[in-house]
């Protein structure tokens, strides 16, 4: 892994929903993007389906807020330093 990235899911409103929070940062630590999304449980979808929906929406939001640029910059930095992330 060469990009600071994180995600966290938790139950909210007494277990009636899931909150997924995501974060992507620059290697230098001077830039980052955050997003979160609450999705409510219902009788039509499993917990896994609701969690996947929340995570997907957060990922899309992170990308629109600039996460793809941070990830690409980290890849370029790793390549310039000839770092093989598989060897870490």
Image (cartoon, rainbow, N blue to C red):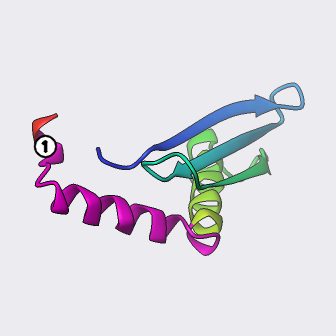
| Quarter of the rendering containing residue 15 | top right
Q: Characterize the local packing of mark 1: few (<14), some (14-19) or many (20 or more) Cα atoms within 10 angstroms.
A: few
Question: Is 81 contained in the magenta span?
Answer: yes
Q: Is residue 18 above or below residue 62?
A: above
Q: Residue at x 56, y 61 (%)?
A: 59
Tell me residue 17's x, y (percent): 79, 39
- Left/right placement of residue 87 relative to residue 65 reads left
In the orientation shown, which residue stands out farthest toward the top? 14
Residue 29 placement (x, y as % from top left): 53, 45
Q: Main SS of the magenta segment? A: helix
In the rendered image, which residue does mark 1 sit on? Answer: 86
Q: Quadrant of the N terminus?
A: top left
The quadrant of the image that shows the C terminus is top left
Q: Residue at x 87, y 25 (%)?
A: 14
User: What is the tally of numbered marks visible in this picture?
Assistant: 1
30 left or right of 36 in image: left
Quarter of the image holding residue 73?
Answer: bottom left
Q: Toward which corner of the image does residue 57 lie, by quadrant?
A: bottom right
Q: Is residue 84 above or below residue 12?
A: below
Residue 60 shown left or right of residue 74 in the figure: right
Q: Which residues are magenta?
A: 63-86
- Please say whether residue 26 is one of the residues in the magenta stretch: no
Residue that appears at 56% across and 41% down:
7
> Residue 18 location in percent, x, y?
73, 40
The residue nearer to you, when weighing 78 against 62, is: 78
Going 27% across and 60% down the picture, which residue do you hit?
A: 77
């Amino acid at each position: 892994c060469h990009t600071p990235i994180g995600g966290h899911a938790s139950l909210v409103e007494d277990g009636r929903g899931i909150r997924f929070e995501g974060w992507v940062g620059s290697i230098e630590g001077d830039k980052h993007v955050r997003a979160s999304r609450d999705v409510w449980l219902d009788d039509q979808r499993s917990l896994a389906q609701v969690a996947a929906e929340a995570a997907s929406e957060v990922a899309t939001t992170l990308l629109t807020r600039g996460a793809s640029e941070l990830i690409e910059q980290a890849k370029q930095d790793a390549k310039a330093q000839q770092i093989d992330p598989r060897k870490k």
